[in-house]
Image (tube, rainbow, N blue to C red):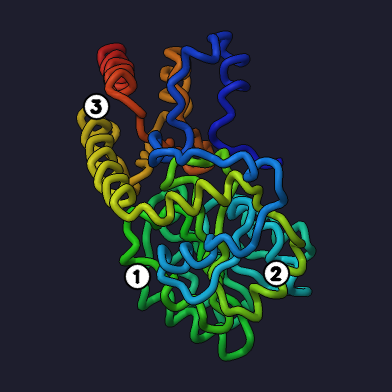
């Protein structure tokens, strides 16, 4: 399995620091969630009901014509390659590594390409995968550019797969409103923006024919009753969504300013994380880990990704650790 952020228990064991003492900034998950609804007993005791308004509420929230709930967008990432055979797949890299791995696992020919070479490579591709905003760089491609890429692929039955796991803070840049077009597939993550990663919920936005095929492949009851219930509550809470969006925007800007103040100016980011390219990523990672602060290390791009602290104590701990690093330099 590929390495991911959030492996706090492994970090605690590796550094011999108690689990409860850690500040986990290694993921791009919102550190606070919307108010949790009271769950009825039958959410636990009955099979999930497909007519509970989850799909309708998700369509309204995303501005899409049709959606398919899945057990986290990771499930869709692994399943979509099974719907094609012997495809030539381009993955705009660097990005979330599971995309390329999932297509390779199903026997497809995968080419990891840069943004600058995508137009030259497109005529040789059946599928193009783009993470937008990118993870970990935070780079966001314009809607018009992506729609142009989609049109060129769709002319010959190709797909454009857009992973918008971090788009909720900037919904105006989403392709969700165009997702009914054949060959355009948009993936959304519920857990990151809503701070509910443990609920394991995501959505595939696409034309109804493709969603039906994917739904048949995945089978019934992919989403548990309690997750469906809390998701309906949060997707309907427009005031809570606005507060969450405003809070994350402020925290994202605060994190960028804090990192820059201590010589780690972000090279990119979004409302949920900041990305720093540095000459000594391993040294900074270890310095923070020795103080029970976990960030995400990307050795192959000499970079670090910082998530958001959940409270003022977390902010102060991060600032103190960064200040100590500057003094020791």
**Residue at left offset 64%, top offset 44%:** 42
Residue count near mark 3 (Cα–Cα under 10 Å), binned few <14, some 14–19, many ≥20 = some
Which one is nearer the viewer's eye here, 241 or 50? 50
Mark pair 3, 1: CA separation: 31 Å
Q: Nearer the N terminus, badge 3 or badge 1?
A: 1
Quarter of the rendering containing residue 39: top right
Q: Are marks 3 and 1 in contact (CB under 8 Å)?
A: no
Residue at image mark 3: 262
Which one is nearer the viewer's eye here, 217 or 74? 217
| Residue 301 appears left or right of 1 | left
Quarter in which the N terminus is drawn? top right
Q: Nearer the N terminus, badge 2 or badge 3?
A: 2
Point out residue 83 in the picture as x, y percentages from the top left corner.
74, 72
Mark pair 1, 2: CA separation: 28 Å
**Residue at left offset 56%, top offset 85%:** 154
Residue at image mark 2: 214
What secondary structure is marked by label 1? loop
**Residue at left offset 46%, top offset 15%:** 292
Q: Are marks 1 and 2 in contact (CB under 8 Å)?
A: no
Residue at image mark 1: 142
Quarter in which the C terminus is drawn? top left
Residue count near mark 2 (Cα–Cα under 10 Å), binned few <14, some 14–19, many ≥20 = some
Mark pair 2, 3: CA separation: 47 Å
């Amino acid at each position: 399995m590929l390495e991911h952020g959030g492996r706090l228990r492994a970090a605690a064991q590796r550094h011999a620091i108690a689990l409860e003492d850690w500040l986990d900034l290694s993921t791009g998950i919102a550190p606070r969630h919307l108010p949790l609804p009271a769950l009825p007993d039958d959410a636990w005791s009955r099979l999930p009901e497909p007519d509970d308004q989850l799909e309708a509420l998700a369509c309204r929230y995303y501005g899409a014509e049709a959606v398919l709930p899945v057990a986290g967008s990771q499930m869709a990432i692994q399943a979509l390659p099974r719907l094609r055979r012997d495809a030539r797949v381009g993955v705009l890299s660097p990005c979330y590594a599971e995309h390329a791995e999932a297509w390779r696992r199903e026997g497809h020919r995968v080419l990891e390409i840069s943004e600058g070479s995508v137009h030259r490579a497109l005529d040789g591709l059946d599928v193009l995968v783009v993470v937008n905003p990118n993870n970990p760089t935070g780079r966001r491609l314009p809607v018009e550019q992506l729609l142009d890429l989609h049109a060129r692929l769709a002319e010959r039955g190709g797909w454009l797969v857009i992973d918008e796991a971090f788009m909720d803070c900037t919904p105006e840049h989403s392709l969700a409103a165009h997702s009914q077009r054949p060959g355009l597939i948009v993936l959304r993550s519920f857990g990151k923006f809503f701070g509910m990663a443990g609920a394991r919920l995501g959505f595939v936005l696409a034309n109804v024919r493709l969603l039906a095929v994917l739904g048949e492949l995945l089978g019934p009851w992919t989403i548990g009753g309690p997750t469906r219930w809390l998701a309906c509550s949060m997707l309907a809470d427009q005031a809570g969504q606005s507060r969450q969006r405003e809070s994350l925007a402020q925290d994202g800007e605060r994190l960028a300013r804090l990192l820059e103040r201590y010589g780690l100016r972000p090279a990119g980011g979004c409302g949920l994380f900041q990305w720093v390219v540095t000459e000594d990523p391993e040294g900074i990672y270890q310095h923070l880990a020795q103080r029970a602060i976990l960030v995400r290390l990307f050795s192959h791009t000499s970079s670090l990704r910082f998530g958001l602290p959940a409270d003022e104590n977390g902010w102060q701990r991060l600032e103190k650790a960064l200040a100590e690093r500057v003094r020791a330099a």
